[in-house]
Image: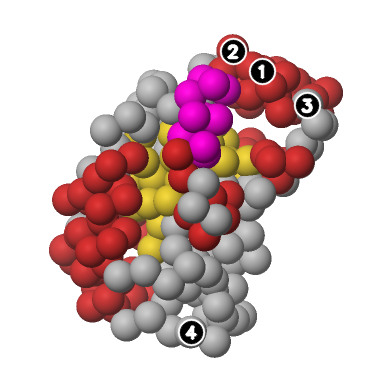
């Protein structure tokens, strides 16, 4: 890589902040290897989106490729929900152990569960896994009050979640965002007035959303649901190597 510019500081891996959480929607092994050759150092964790990991034919090879590049893998929270719905959580845990997966995403985007019940699941899973819990509804017509977001976030962090993911889906039109994709700025401000942004991962699949969070919280904000082909574009936003953030980081 080139190295003649003064750029914003980025922590080295394994990072606690400045995390880029990538969603793998089912890319093939060769595409995965090309991506890792180009930008593995910018990827902190990969989620095999939704239930794609359950039906991917080359699952073990993909997991091995990510892990060889030093990138943890987890299944999408939807698969965790399906396991709970069928009473198969123990089988799910054994599968994770067999595959050498050490991270679990726990969501209740579809399942209805009290804050206390969800916290109990997180507490138990956190004994053996690094848990990323998720808050916010996947339904665009459901608007969750800020106080409810805060109650859930604080309960899940207390229960042992490593990070709490703020929901947006892969579309970026629910949860943190309006149907237009516009950030619910008041919601974000209220959440971060009580919770350290470093303990959160903000799902931000759209470029304008990534720009907003980087401008608001700096280059080392944690961002999730990043498409595999958006890893390098996001890193250029973090470093001010794109017009959207160049002025913020290089022109005072």
Work out how far the residue at label 4 is from the one at label 2, CA to CA, in angstroms.
40 Å
The earlier-in-sequence mark between 4 and 3 is 3
Is residue 23 visible in the rendered image? The answer is: yes
Q: Residue at x 21, y 69 (%)?
A: 151
The earlier-in-sequence mark between 1 and 3 is 3
The earlier-in-sequence mark between 4 and 1 is 1
Write down the region rendered in magenta: 91-100
Local SS, label 3: loop
Asked if disc 1 and disc 2 are in contact, CB closer than 8 Å, the reply is yes
Judging by the rendered image, the residue that carries numbered circle 2 is 68
The earlier-in-sequence mark between 2 and 3 is 3
Work out how far the residue at label 1 is from the one at label 2, CA to CA, in angstroms.
5 Å
Judging by the rendered image, the residue that carries numbered circle 3 is 58
The location of residue 54, given as percent across then percent down, is 69, 41
Residue neighbourhood size for the residue with mark 3, other residues' Cα within 10 Å, grouped as few (<14), some (14–19), many (≥20)? few
The colour scheme of the drawn protein is secondary structure
Judging by the rendered image, the residue that carries numbered circle 1 is 65
The location of residue 220, given as percent across then percent down, is 37, 41
- Foreground mark, 4 or 3, reads 3
Name the quarter where the N terminus is drawn: top right
Q: Residue at x 38, y 23 (%)?
A: 14
- The label shown at residue 142 is 4
Most common secondary structure along the magenta stretch: helix
Residue neighbourhood size for the residue with mark 1, other residues' Cα within 10 Å, grouped as few (<14), some (14–19), many (≥20)? some
- Foreground mark, 1 or 3, reads 3
- Asked whether 119 or 222 is in front, the reply is 119
Work out how far the residue at label 4 is from the one at label 1, CA to CA, in angstroms.
38 Å
Local SS, label 4: loop
Q: Residue at x 47, y 73 (%)?
A: 137
Residue neighbourhood size for the residue with mark 2, other residues' Cα within 10 Å, grouped as few (<14), some (14–19), many (≥20)? few
Local SS, label 1: helix
């Amino acid at each position: 890589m080139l190295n003649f510019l003064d750029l914003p500081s980025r922590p080295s891996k394994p990072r606690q902040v400045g995390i880029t959480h990538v969603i793998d929607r089912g890319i093939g092994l060769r595409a995965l290897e090309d991506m890792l050759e180009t930008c593995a150092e910018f990827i902190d964790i990969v989620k095999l989106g939704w239930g794609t990991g359950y039906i991917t034919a080359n699952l073990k090879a993909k997991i091995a490729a990510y892990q060889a590049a030093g990138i943890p893998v987890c299944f999408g929270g939807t698969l965790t929900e399906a396991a709970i719905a069928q009473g198969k959580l123990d089988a799910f845990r054994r599968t994770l152990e067999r595959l050498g997966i050490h991270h679990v995403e726990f969501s209740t985007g579809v399942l209805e569960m009290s804050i206390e019940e969800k916290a109990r699941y997180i507490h138990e899973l956190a004994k053996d896994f690094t848990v990323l819990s998720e808050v916010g509804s996947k339904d665009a017509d459901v608007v969750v009050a800020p106080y409810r977001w805060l109650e859930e976030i604080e309960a899940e962090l207390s229960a042992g979640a490593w990070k709490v993911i703020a929901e947006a889906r892969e579309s970026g039109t629910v949860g943190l965002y309006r149907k237009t994709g516009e950030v619910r700025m008041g919601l974000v401000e209220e959440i971060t007035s009580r919770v350290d942004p470093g303990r959160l991962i903000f799902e931000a699949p759209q470029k304008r959303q990534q720009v907003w969070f980087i401008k608001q919280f700096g280059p080392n904000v944690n961002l999730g649901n990043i498409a595999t082909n958006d890893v390098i574009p996001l890193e250029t936003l973090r470093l001010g190597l794109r017009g959207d953030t160049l002025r913020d980081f290089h022109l005072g």
